[in-house]
Image (tube, helix red, strand yellow):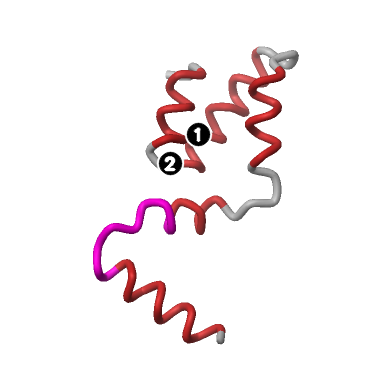
Amino acid sequence: MSTKTYAKLLENQGYFLEAVKVYRELLKKNSDDEEIKKTLKKYEGVNLKVLEFFTRMEKEKDYEKLERWLCKWS
């Protein structure tokens, strides 16, 4: 299923990698769509895996994993 609605749903639920894939697929079909171009532009240079992790953190073990990661890099 490749629609803007589906891509927005994925984006709103924190599935940014999948949403960007759908947006790119849609842009191939409609290269003049400025809304899609604008949406994709906001994710340029963003590490989507990290963004998904932070957006979807909900369990204590997720926070512990983040804390270990931060300690490692500080």
The quarter of the rendered structure image containing the C terminus is: bottom right
Q: Which residues are magenta?
A: 53-61
Tell me what residue is drawn at x 53 percent, y 28 percent: 22
Q: CA distance from mark 1 to mark 2?
A: 6 Å
In the rendered view, tell whether residue 71 sits above or below residue 42: below
Residue 67's disc is none
Is residue 10 inside the magenta stretch?
no
The number of numbered badges drawn on the structure is: 2
Residue 68: where, in percent of width, then height? 40, 81
Residue identified by numbered label 1: 19
From the viewer's perspective, is 28 left or right of 7?
A: right
The residue shown at (47%, 27%) is 8
Q: Are marks 1 and 2 in contact (CB under 8 Å)?
A: yes
User: Which residue is at the far left?
Assistant: 60
Which quarter of the figure has residue 32?
A: top right
Residue 35 to residue 10: above or below: above
Q: Does residue 42 appear to the left or right of 58 in the view shown?
A: right
Residue in the picture at 51% in, 58% down: 50
Q: Which three-letter amino acid code belongs to the residue tagged 1?
A: Ala
Q: Residues within 10 Å of mark 1 (few under 14, many from 20)?
A: many
Q: Position of residue 5 (x, y in %)?
A: 45, 19
The location of residue 23, given as percent across then percent down, is 58, 27
In the displayed structure, 33 sits above or below 70; it is above
- Residue labelled with disc 2: 15
* Element type where label 1 sits in the image: helix
Name which residue type carries label 2: Tyr
Q: Residue 57: which quarter of the image?
A: bottom left
Q: In screen coordinates, is 4 left or right of 46?
A: left
Q: Does the stretch in magenta take in 55?
A: yes
